[in-house]
Amino acid sequence: MWPMLLTAKVSSSKEVKNSEIFPTSAQLFFISISVSSFSQMSEKHSNNSSVNVPLVADHGELAQHKTITYPPSAQDTVSLFHTCLNGLNAISGVGILSVPYALASGGWLSLVLLFGIATAALYTGTLIKRCMDMNTNIRSYPDIGELAFGKTGRIIVSVSMYTELYLVSMGFLILEGDNLSNLFPNAKVHIAGLAIAGKQFFVILVSLIILPTVWLDSLSLLSYVSASGVFASLLIILSITWTAIFDGVGFHHKGTLIHWNGLSTAISLYAFCYCAHPVFPTLYNSMTNKHHFTNVLIGCFLLTTVGYASIAIVGYLMFGEEVESQVTLNLPLNKVSSKVAIYTTLMNPISKFALMTTPITNALKDLLPRSYKNKVTNILVSTMLVMSTTIAALALPFFGSLMSLVGAFLSVTASIMLPCLCYLKISDTYRNFGCESIVIVILIMAALAMAISGTYTSFMEIAHHLVQL
C-alpha cells in the first residue's frame, strides 16, 4: 500500500540514520478491504457493511471466467468525490518528503524515471480494473491472484500485501516518534515508577491517538480522514515553497545532471510513491458508478505526480546535494512556514494509519468463528493490531533500512509485477503475443530489475547496521 513521511538514506554515499525512515508502501498505501468469501456474499450484502479479505478461500466461481451479477451491496455507496479522496490519500503523501532526496540521489535526469514509473503504475492500475471487469466475483486484490494462479496466487498476493501494509504502519509510528522527539526533546512521563521519554514516549502517545481511527470500518467515513491527509500533503508543498521564496532560503543550488551510483536509491523511492495498488479493488467495489474508475485513476495519478515533481524540484533547488531524506529536516526552525510544514507532516501518519491497517484487521477478523464476529471483537482485533505495531516500532532500531527493503521488493512486486502477471493469465493475452503483451513483458522485466537492485542495496544497509550493533 497510501503519497509524506516514511524515508531513509539508503545510498552508500550517505549514512543512514536510525531516526530517518525510508518510505515503503505503502505511498502504501492500501485500503484493500473486501468480502470474506463469495459463498457468503449475498448474506454479507444484506446484513453487514463491513468487508473482509481472507488469506485463503474456496471460491468455486473464481475458477471460472464468468460474470455473475450481485445486487448492489452496502459498499456500493461511495461517491466519485469520496473515492477520489481515498485514492489521493492512498497514493499521495507517503513519499512526498523523500522525493527531493530521491532527485538528489539520481540527479535531474532521474525525473524521467519518476514520470516513467508513474505511467507504468497507472497502466498496471487499469490492468487491475480490467481483471475485475472480467469476473465480478473479484472483491479484493488477493481474489485477483487466486483467479490467475489459484490458491498459491492468492497466498503470494496476500502475504506480499499484508506484510508491506504492516511494516509501513510500523514505520508511521517510528516516524512520528522521531519527529516529535526532535521537536520536544525533554518530554517525559512517569508511569508506575517507570520513566518513558523521548521517541518511545511519542510512539506510544501517537498510537493512542490513532487507535480510534482504526475502529472505523466504512470507506465513506474514512474518506473524511483521507481528506485531512490530502490537505496535509498540499499544505506541505505550499509551506516549503513559501520558505524558499519568502523566508530567505532561496533556490541557490543547481544540482547534478545524473548520479549513476544513486539511481537504485532514486528508483526505489519513486516506485514506492505509487504502491497503492492493493487498494484499487476496494475503491472500485465501493464506488456507486464503477464506470468512472479509470477517470479516478487518471486524476489521482496526474495530481500526485505533479505534486511529487514539484516538491522534488523545489527541495533539490533549495538544498542541493545536502538535502536530507526528509526535506523538513533541512528547514530553518525559526521560520513560521517551516513550522507549518513540520507540524503538518505529523498529520499524515495519523490520517493514513487506519487506511493501511484496515485490510489486515479485516483479514484477521475473517479468521474468527462466525459467533465471535461482532462490533466488540472487531474493536479488540483492531486494538491488538495497533498494540503489535507499537511494540514492533519500539523494538526495531534500524527500521529505515528495513523500510527500504520493503519499498524495493514488496512495493514493486505488488504495484507492477503482480498486476502484469495476473492480467496476462486471466485475459489469456499471453497466447496472442501482440503489442500489449510485449509492453507487459517489458514492464515485468523492468520491475524484476528494480526489485533485484533495490533489494541488494537494502540488504547491504541492513547488514551494515547489524555489524554496528
Image: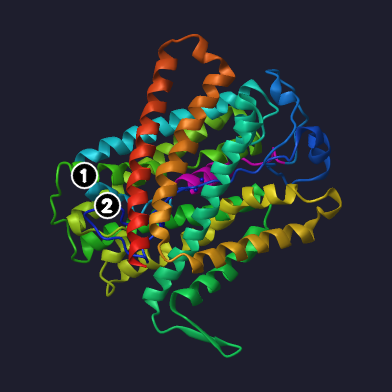
Specify whether residue 336 is painted magenta: no
Residue at (42%, 66%) from the top-left corner?
Answer: 397
Q: Nearer the viewer, residue 339 or 435?
A: 435
Where is residue 155 drawn, in percent x and y?
62, 37
Which label's residue is closer to the chain start, 2 or 1? Answer: 2
Asked if 236 appears above or below 293 in the picture, the reply is below
Specify whether residue 77 is painted magenta: yes
Residue at (32%, 58%) from the top-left corner?
Answer: 464
Q: What element does badge 1 sit on?
A: helix
Which residue is label 1 attached to? 261
Which residue is label 2 attached to? 11
Where is residue 101 drawn, in percent x and y?
27, 53
Q: Is residue 207 left or right of residue 456?
A: right
> Residues under labels 2 and 1: Cα distance?
8 Å
Dot 1, crowdedness within 10 Å: few (<14), some or many (≥20)?
few
Q: Which residues are magenta?
A: 75-92
Q: Nearer the viewer, residue 265 or 257?
A: 265
Where is residue 58 drawn, in percent x and y?
75, 32
- Is there any visible trace of residue 97 in the rendered image? no
